[in-house]
Image (cartoon, rainbow, N blue to C red):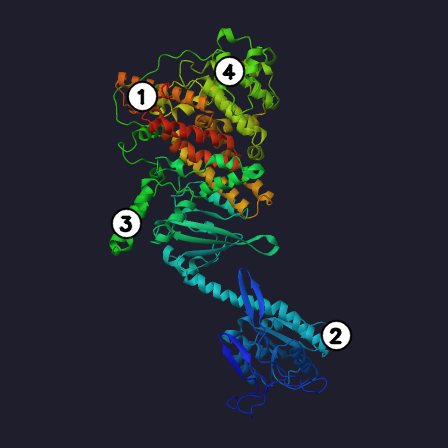
Amino acid sequence: MGCASSIHISDRVVYHSGKESEDSHSPQQTNTTQHQGNPASGLPIKPLSCKTTLTEVQFGPMKLFKDPLQVLLVFAKEDSQSNGFCWACEKANFRCCMARTPESALECFSEKHHDLVIIDHRHSRHFDAEALCRSIRAVNSSENTVIVAVVKRPDREEASVMPLINAGFNRRYVENANMMACYNELLQLEHGEVRAQFKLRAGNAIFTALEQSQEAIEITSEDQVIQYVNPAYESIMGYQQGELIGKEIIEVPKSEKNKPDLLETINSCIRKGKEWQGIYYAKKKNGDSIQQNVKITPVIGQGGKIRHYVSINRPLNDNNKSDKTSERVQAESQTDIQSSKHKDRRKGSLDVRSTTSRGSDGSSQRRHSSMARIHSMTIEAPITKVINIINAAQESSPMPVAEALDRVLEILRTTELYSPQLGTKDEDPHTNDLVGGLMTDGLRRLSGNEYIFATKQPHHIPSHLTTPLSLNDIPPRIAQTMENEDSWDFDIFNLEAATMKRPLTYLGLKIFSRFGVCEFLSCPEATLRSWLQVIEANYHSSNSYHNSTHAADVLHATAYFLCKERVKQSLDPIDEVAALIAATVHDVDHPGRTNSFLCNAGSELAILYNDTAVLESHHAALAFQITTRDDKCNIFKNMERNEYRTLRQAIIDMVLATEMTKHFEHVNKFVNSINKPLAALEENGGNNDEESVKSVLTSPENRILVKRMLIKCADISNPCRPQELCIEWAGRISEEYFAQTDEEKRQGLPVVMPVFDRNTCSIPKSQISFIDYFITDMFDAWDAFADLPNLMQHLDNNFKYWKGLDERKLHSLRPPPE
């Protein structure tokens, strides 16, 4: 056979120039020849050089290198058409073999596996071209070969190409012996079908990697029809490929352990072209549920549309220790922002002073540093450590023990076990008591005692308040006190003194006017004034902390946050109105006692609300009761029904978000759904991708998270206030906790926070614990979003102040006089 001799280097073929070696095929086999002459002129063609020029082809992230094309020409007799293709191959620097019979063509193809085969289909008397094409297609290596049929120029009607396609041809070439026509055809084939097939051939390597992967991989179409699962998927889930391929995802049984709205959340994310990663329970064929770290990536294809979804699933007990940390950090449903290091964690935090004095770009640099902290929030609950220990133990355990530990892990992996805990009371009693008191709704020990509040007076507008003030009637002294109410350093205690403990009505009038609340609600100013008065009248002035001054302070912080640019980009006018109203009513009728106290005392409210979010539920319900029962103060009276329902739901959601038992859940969701996606967008190209940023900021679910975070930060922003204000608030909350401990002892109730004994309590320690445990991470996240350098500076200063007192073993709010 006359094919050129070759050297095999990996899967590439490099041809020798010149004559064949003596151990090549027998010279008698002349059916297949290496073309060596110019068919047009009869002059010899310069032989191909031994040097091989590789063509670089990009295939996704893969960079491929292709040898010059190998072409097999199958023509029974030499004619101008065969000569035209021979000349074109030489000009294009392709390697060309000529076969005269089907047998020699098959033999040559089986040896060389050509990229392109051109078969003469014009003369059926020499050989059956379609039968030859089928024979070539029967060779395993022909899948990525392009086969062209050279056909006669039609005399009459154009013939159908279907017989050619059915035989295995890729395309036809209507006879044209013009050498440039042949050359152009080869170039089009090289850059079209041949290159496409070359990429597909490289895809085999990718599928080999998928088949060998230890992670379960599933590929679905844009309509979520399963197209591929790898052997690891079959092994983990217990299904065979044939049972899944062609089925829609919804047809595969689902585990009942997932949250009801999880699938909707996942689909909402990936349909927008965004990657989703988190914890998901999958249901195996045998009915067992398996918890997996799942990463679903949409693949953009033709037309810029999503054409596939690739799901990579890794069981959480896969013994891959190197990935345990990343699984905890990345999966929202497994990672609550929680703390195992409660001693002076701020030492490792950003020095706020250094970031607020960097000139014009200091703000963005500081936000970037803030985001570095967001990415590194890996604070663990003890249950996370337990799971890691069990995972490690499984590696060296026999199969029965490993399987038993699987069941243990499945039981342990429930959301209730991921709330943060502390080590021992001896280690940090202030933090232990503070967290226990704020984050539990239940009993510390059962008690037969019941605590019933004194019979309540009906909530109404006191008679001396029935004549509402006008914004224009505010006394000059009070108006002057409120001149800088749009500043974070506004002194709420000056306003409390100037208004004789009625700051909420006055500040509310001014802030609500500034935000156009009356215009939005279509309510007269007189109605708003009456409403503010009745709400303030239902705050207990006898409480040292939870009184209308606290409500006014939270309203002020809320209004301040609403003016930040990122917040304005995220929220709609109805959200702003909801936030202002929620801040105003969020602690109405607060008794000055914690939820734990009310539950332990068996109070009427605890019974009414089933010991769950007792106070927050009461604040929200009472606010709407006293608003809607009297037209004189019903600010919602003129609203359209659907808009009212939307506003009401937003207000209730924000008030309930102030309950501390869900603190870490809210912060964690905010970090994972907003902070991290925004940080990723900034890292991948700044703010240029405005649509993507807008999508993160304005999605309905993220707007809810922003509103929750906003009111939470406003509610406990005292450590971020100027130092004198911070100290005053610390004294007030401590006094309220002292009073609760006194009453618990008098009533024989469980003492929820024993450390808050007025005779022994260290106020600096309690503040340090509160900042460490609740404030730092939350305000790092909020600052990264809203850009609040002044607050972070105050927080840093106040923390150092409390640390200084504690290091001097002082228990008081202030150091003794020099």
The crowding category of the residue bearing disc 2, from other C-alpha atoms within 10 Å (few below 14, some 14 to 19, many at least 20), is: few
Residue picked out by circle 3? 405
- Secondary structure under tag 1 reads loop
Secondary structure, mark 2, is loop
In this rendering, the answer to whether 142 lies above or below 254 is: below
- Tag shown at residue 199: none
Of callouts 3 and 4, which one flags the residue occurring earlier in the amino acid sequence?
Answer: 3
Q: Is residue 422 above or below residue 163?
A: above
Q: Is residue 33 visible?
A: yes
Q: Gap between marks 4 and 1, in whole Å?
A: 37 Å
Label 1 vs label 3, nearer the camera = 3
**Type of amino acid at the residue the image marks with label 1:** Gly
Indicate which disc, 1 or 2, sits on the residue closer to the N terminus.
2
Q: Which residue is mark 2?
A: 156
Nearer the observer: mark 3 or 2; the answer is 3
Q: Residues within 10 Å of mark 1 (few under 14, many from 20)?
A: some
Q: Nearer the viewer, mark 3 or mark 4?
A: 4
Task: Give how far across and how far down residue 412 sits, in percent.
Answer: 31, 43
Please, what is the three-letter code of the amino acid marked with disc 2?
A: Arg
Q: Which residue is mark 1?
A: 602
Between circles 4 and 1, the one closer to the viewer is 4
Which mark, by number, is residue 495?
Answer: 4
The answer for how far apart the CA atoms under marks 4 and 2 are is 99 Å
Farthest residue toward the front?
818
Q: Amino acid at mark 4?
A: Leu
